[in-house]
Image (cartoon, rainbow, N blue to C red):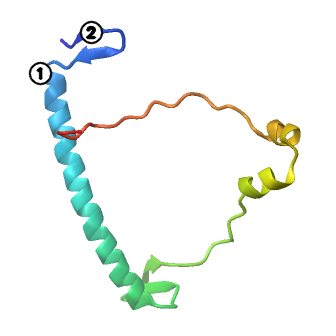
Amino acid sequence: MSIEIESGVIELDKVAQAWLVAYREAQGQVDSWREKADIARANIEAVLGASEVGLINGHEVISWRFSKPVFRFDATKAKSILEPEMLALLYSEGAPVRSFRVIKDGE
């Protein structure tokens, strides 16, 4: 059983340590496969060129179509144009977010 050392800090037990090892190994495989996928996609995109659809035996297997342009709020421009009071009305505070990060050896 993991033991709480102090408030918010625990010493991982053997089971949790094994899950950490499994997680690290899986992440390494994900990174490797992501690199392979990126290379494969780049090669497929190169073959498609300006085409939007790729076929195998007459069946659509790749779709690379344009979507609607994205509409974004330019916060930098808003800060340069709006008064601080008006700008303050546009901000809202979100809920806290927990960030999960596995520390690599030596960090």
Residue 4: mark in rendering = 2
Is 58 located above or below residue 106 in the figure? below
Residue 97 appearing in the image: yes
Which residue type does callout 1 highlight? Lys
Q: Give how far across and how far down residue 97 sits, in percent.
A: 51, 31
Residue of label 1: 14
Q: Quadrant of the C terminus?
A: top left
- The residue carrying pointer 1 sits among few (fewer than 14), some (14 to 19) or many (20 or more) residues within 10 Å by Cα, namely few
Q: Quadrant of the N terminus?
A: top left
Is 34 located above or below residue 48 in the figure? above
Kindly report the distance in space between the C-alpha atoms of the residues bearing marks 1 and 2: 14 Å
Element marked by disc 2: strand
Is 87 located above or below residue 61 in the figure? above
Comparing 33 with 59, the one in front is 33
Residue 55 appearing in the image: no
Comparing 103 with 23, the one in front is 103
